[in-house]
Image (cartoon, grey):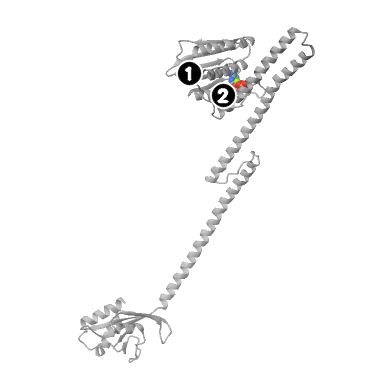
């Protein structure tokens, strides 16, 4: 189209005054010089005047659409098959104008064989590349989904097993991706559940044991009293005393358990009131001193300066201190010493219960605050004391810390905000 347009404007500038038919040979040479295409010059009636391939003149070209268009004054394009060779060609005709009237037209014809074969090559190439891309994407997708579904299958299998109650199962972590993290989480969950299952079982067996001991003693005394208690006043007295204290022990234990379940569910509330700590500590120590004395342990208080009155739940604090001193008495051998020390520090009151008892191993130290945890499974107690105490101190916005040296003794420190 560019070449035809250029040729037409060249003609308009330099040959407009000449007769087209006479100059056609010269014109053809000029036009064909600059082009690889076949060039034709046609007169306004559609008769072929010149052809660069030497096609004989006098052919009537009016049946080509591009020729018809150019005669009407517009550039025309046609593609189709060459009449003689059946080759695919593209023809462009451009009107040649002189003084605003159309005196003929120039027609450029080029073979499309090479273009079509290039296009075909490109098409084949694109199709190949496209299929390759589709193949790669499909393979990648399959591999990816295979790895993902494999991990998910593992997870599902493990989760199914856990639903059945098998918490010893562990998921194999295949990759360090999100599913790997999920596997870790699932494993961690399973091990926590197993641990708490274990604790629960230990707890049930220790609680049953704890309950059976006083029940055995009560039952034994009732049998004794039934057979000869009526006549023996001192025996009756002793027996009833023991039955009473054993019942108290049972009640205390049940209370503790109820308390704990409430604390654990967060259903317990702290009833704040002014508490005189010095007085409270003295009262508790007075209450527990006889028991300590029976075991040959000295129980002392050390409260230096006057302690401030604090806002706290007196009954709950009492429970904590009794728990701590009870532990100290339980784990200290005769001729040992227990010291309850209270003092003020900036914006807090510190109470420590220090004993010269057995101490706690480093491993146990990390666990003693857990519910139901006991250093020695066969020792008496439910393993709740420290867990409850810690909860209560936390509810008071305070802190409970334990330091211990095995064989030397234990210090439990409570910080309470003033
Ligand atoms: N003063 C201490 N000296 C040595 N070991 C201690 C002391 N206090 C606690 N422990 C260890 O910590 C464990 C947990 O104590 P915790 O008071 O929670 O339970 P417990 O005394 O066994 O049972 P409970 O208090 O419910 O009757 C104890 O079993 C013991 O092994
Ligand atoms: Mg205890």
Question: Residue under circle 1?
Answer: 273
Image quarter of residue 1: bottom left
Calculate the distance from the C-alpha at mark 1 to the C-alpha at mark 2: 20 Å
Image coords of residue 271 (percent x, y): 50, 21
Q: Nearer the viewer, residue 22 or 261?
A: 261
Is residue 370 something that shows in the picture?
Answer: no
Whichever of labels 1 and 2 marks the residue nearer the N terminus, that label is 1
Q: Nearer the viewer, residue 368 or 245?
A: 245
**Left-right relation of 241 to 389:** right
Ligand 1 neighbours mark 1 (CB distance < 8 Å): no
Is residue 108 something that shows in the picture?
Answer: yes
Who's the residue at 56% across and 40% down the image?
185
Question: Residue under circle 2?
Answer: 388
Q: Is residue 395 above or below residue 112?
A: above
Q: In the rendered view of the protein, which quadrant contains the C terminus? A: top left
Who's the residue at 60% across and 38% down the image?
190
Who's the residue at 66% across and 41% down the image?
164
């Amino acid at each position: 189209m560019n070449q035809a347009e250029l040729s037409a404007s060249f003609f308009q500038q330099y040959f407009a005054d000449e007769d087209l038919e006479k100059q056609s040979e010269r014109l053809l040479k000029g036009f064909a010089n600059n082009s690889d295409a076949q060039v034709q010059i046609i007169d306004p009636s559609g008769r072929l005047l010149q052809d660069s391939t030497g096609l004989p003149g006098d052919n009537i070209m009016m049946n080509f659409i591009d020729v018809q268009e150019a005669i009407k004054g517009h550039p025309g394009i046609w593609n189709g098959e060459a009449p003689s060779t059946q080759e695919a060609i593209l023809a462009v005709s451009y009107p040649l104008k002189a003084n605003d009237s159309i005196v003929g037209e120039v027609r450029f014809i080029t073979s499309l064989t090479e273009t079509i074969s290039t296009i075909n090559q490109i098409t084949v190439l694109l199709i190949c590349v496209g299929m390759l891309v589709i193949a790669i994407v499909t393979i990648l997708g399959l591999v990816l989904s295979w790895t993902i579904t494999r991990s998910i299958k593992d997870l599902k299998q493990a989760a199914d097993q856990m639903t059945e109650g098998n918490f010893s199962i562990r998921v194999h972590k295949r990759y360090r991706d999100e599913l790997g993290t999920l596997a870790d989480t699932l494993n961690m969950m399973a091990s926590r559940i197993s641990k708490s299952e274990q604790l629960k079982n230990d707890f049930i067996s220790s609680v049953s044991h704890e309950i059976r001991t006083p029940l055995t003693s009560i039952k034994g005394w009732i049998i004794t009293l039934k057979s000869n208690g009526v006549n023996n006043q001192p025996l009756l007295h002793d027996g009833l005393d023991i039955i009473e204290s054993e019942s108290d022990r049972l009640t205390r234990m049940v209370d503790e358990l109820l308390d704990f379940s409430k604390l654990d569910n967060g259903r317990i509330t702290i009833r704040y009131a002014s508490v005189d700590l010095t007085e409270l500590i003295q009262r508790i120590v007075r209450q527990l001193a006889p028991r300590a004395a029976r075991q040959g342990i000295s129980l002392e208080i050390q409260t230096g300066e006057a302690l401030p009155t604090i806002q706290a739940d007196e009954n709950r604090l009492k429970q904590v201190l009794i728990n701590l001193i009870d532990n100290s008495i339980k784990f200290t051998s005769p001729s040992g010493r227990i010291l309850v020390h209270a003092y003020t520090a900036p914006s807090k009151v510190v109470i420590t219960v220090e004993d010269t008892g057995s101490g706690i191993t480093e491993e146990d130290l990390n666990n003693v605050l857990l519910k139901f945890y006991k250093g020695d499974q066969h020792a008496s107690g439910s393993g709740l004391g420290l867990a409850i105490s810690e909860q209560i101190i936390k509810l008071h916005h305070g802190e409970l810390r334990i330091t211990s040296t095995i064989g030397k003794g234990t210090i439990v420190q409570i910080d309470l905000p003033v």
